[in-house]
Image: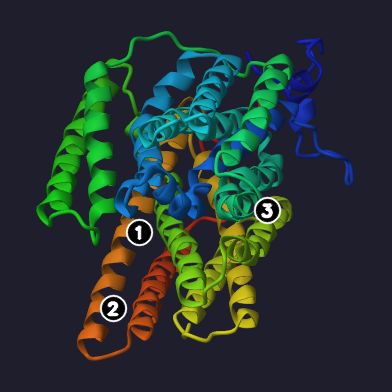
Amino acid sequence: MTTTPESLETPDAPDRQPATQAASPQAPAGEASPDYGVLRWLVAGTFIVILNETIMVNAIPRLMVEFSVDFRAAQWLTSAFMLTMAVVIPITGWFLQRVTTRQALGTAMSIFCAGTLLAALAPTFEVLLAGRIVQATGTAVMMPLLMTTLMTVVAERDRGRIMGNVTLAMSVAPALGPAVSGVILDVASWRWMFGVVLPIAALITVVGLQRLQNVGETVAGSVDWFSVALSAAGFGPLVYGLSQFGGDAAAWVPWTCVAVGLASIAVFVGRQLQLQRGGSPLLDLRALKHRSFTLALLLMSVAFMAMLGSMILLPTYLQEVRGLSELETGLLVMPGGLAMGLLGPQVGKIYDRVGGRPLVIPGSMAVLVALTLLTRVQVDTSMAYLLPVHILLMVGLAAVFTPVFTIGLGALPPELYSHGSSLLGTLQQVAAAAGAAIIAAVITARETSLLGDGVAALEAKVGGMEWGFGVGAILAIVVLAIAIVMPGRVAAGAPGSHSGH
């Protein structure tokens, strides 16, 4: 059964109304596109849950004191969130095909709210860590749910505009996490980071379940638990191992974890290929046969690595080198996050008119220029230099993310939307861990070398950060190279190029 945008907005709209009326490319000039009400609460839910992925960054020093833990242990509040996402997301492709939209929203947001409440009331560090893991389990479902629903209900002519709005949830939320936590920590206890989020998430859950309409049809089928185990044994150790490079762990630990993870993923891939011939893979890898999707997957992963580098390095520079407070750091990086969010809808509208290439290629160039400029940071670099460079970086990423998501998922047939979304989400978590590992290793090596040459500690730290931003600039070159060969639009006649009917 086809679900039209009108039926999403008006539950008792007659089923006999032609779907083509909502999605007709020949809509009169100036006429507003249909209002896809089904997406509102999914976007709101996705924003609030993804915000929590980075909200703990500024709270680490305070939590180390309150719970008497060292930095390595405190970092698990972020690492465990990322690890859980990497393990759970591959399962969501199967899960989303077997439950209704309302059931998926209710399950994801209820789990997230339970984890948030547990974290807010945590009497010990271990309970706080458990709360973060429960939060991440709910978060892992929301992004694939949003992307799958969007690709199912939105007419092709409107996808850029709608995807631009969705960019707010997927890209701006993690960028604003440190800023939001900085403001809260300046006036209240760390517990209020969860206390503020919980009622908002609960309200979104209650109202969303009342107003959300189910989209598409469920598909019956059993889960292959061997694939679930292989997924956990693959993506979990891989992300953990990558996150430990350059850390305090013994040298054999990250290498062993990465080897175990890669070996398990290889078996996981073989198992999915076997299940594809028989029916129900946990993660359908046939999505990778579509060139536009594969290019989009590569570009998004590398761009995410570059973005993460700036998200880690710039706040570290501002606090450890320039001596800014948590609040001051959050306020300095906030304009860039806001610029990305405000530009998202405009980027989407431009994509609908002119396609992706006039956005993705200049956007990739902007990312490259910004990260290259950040390699010039010194001990006394002015804020007047850093602020516009950071905004340029975020604007460039906004110009890249919206078209690439739209082109990549649009190249897939509808039955692969949930699996394509899961692949994108999983690779983002792996890319985040890999990017952090590479940058940390480069910074440590450069800083150690400079200290050995007699350079002062602060200058050596900045020298390491310069090389860290240099890694980001190299990644941006790769992003630009992929952008050049990306198509401008979903090819006419491609499996996912339908117009909502």
Left or right relative to 452: residue 385: right
Q: Residue at x 41, y 58 (%)?
A: 305
Residue 441, picture quadrant: bottom left
Q: Residue at x 69, y 41 (%)?
A: 162
Q: Position of residue 477 (x, y in %)?
A: 42, 71
Q: Residues within 10 Å of mark 1 (few under 14, many from 20)?
A: many
Q: Which residue is mark 3?
A: 341
Q: Secondary structure at mark 1?
A: helix
Q: Quadrant of the C terminus?
A: top right
Left or right relative to 433: residue 143: right
Disc on res. 435 = 1
Disc on res. 82 = none
Looking at the image, is mark 2 or mark 3 nearer the viewer? 2
Looking at the image, is mark 2 or mark 1 nearer the viewer? 2
Q: Residue at x 40, y 30 (%)?
A: 127
Disc 2/disc 3 C-alpha distance (Å): 35 Å
Mark 2: which amino acid? Glu
Q: Earlier in the sequence, mark 2 or mark 1?
A: 1
Mark 3: which amino acid? Gly
The answer to whether 29 is drawn above or below residue 227 in the figure is: below
Residue 16, picture quadrant: top right
Disc 2/disc 1 C-alpha distance (Å): 18 Å
Left or right relative to 322: residue 261: left
Q: Secondary structure at mark 2?
A: helix
The answer, for residue 373, to whether it is visible in the render is yes
As drawn, which residue projects farthest toward the bottom?
Answer: 454
Q: Which residue is mark 2?
A: 447
Q: Residue at x 44, y 55 (%)?
A: 61
Q: Quadrant of the N terminus?
A: top right
